[in-house]
Image (cartoon, helix red, strand yellow):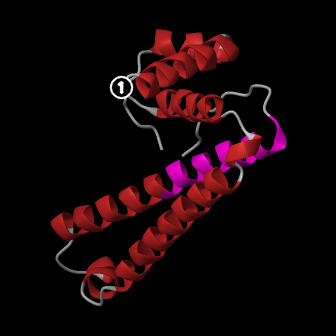
Amino acid sequence: MASETISIDLNSQESLIVALGNVVTQATTVQTQLSNIESSLKGISSQGLAHDYIIDDKDFQIYILRAQELQTLSEVLHQHAMDTLAQFIDKDKVLATEVSNLILQDPKTSAADKQMIKEHPQEAVAHYSEEIAKQEAAGGTTK
């Protein structure tokens, strides 16, 4: 589950927020994958060790619950950092960096787009930052 991210010049507060955004993404992925594993196991196993100890006893639910807790905690920490450090950061730049990282991790993104973001991260962030500013100016919200 290696994730691709870009690296650009950010101050320490912006770097912290981007790192927390990456944690949110990874925690969401873990939670989703664990839920998918559980539903897959139910469909393929009607007996044996997996069925007896994981599905019937609902022991696997504990791990899914912990993954959901980690996801919620990471979201809260990310939002807290955004709110607390708002006056010290370029919010559009941080959000644009997070968008770039999410695009890199999206399996639907074309290889050419991923390559462009990797080779020109500053330009990609500048582009997405401009788009975010346009949306905000048009009355859209980015939180």
Residue 94 as seen in the image, left or right of residue 140? right
Q: Where on the picture, by quarter, is residue 54?
A: bottom left
Q: Which of 68 and 94 is in front in this view?
A: 94
Q: On screen, 121 above or below 99?
A: above
- Say left or right for 143 vs 10: left
Overall secondary structure of the magenta section: helix
- Residue 64 drawn above or below residue 81: below
Q: Which residue is drawn at 35% across and 25% down?
A: 108
Q: In this view, does 138 lie to the left or right of 48?
A: right
Please state the extent of the stretch shown in magenta in the rendering: 11-27
Residue 13: quadrant of the picture: top right
Of all residues, the one furthest to the bottom in this rendering is 57
Residue drawn at (40%, 72%), measured in percent from left and top? 64
Q: Is residue 75 above or below residue 137?
A: below
Q: Residue at x 55, y 27 (%)?
A: 100
Q: Is mark 1 on a helix, strand or loop?
A: loop
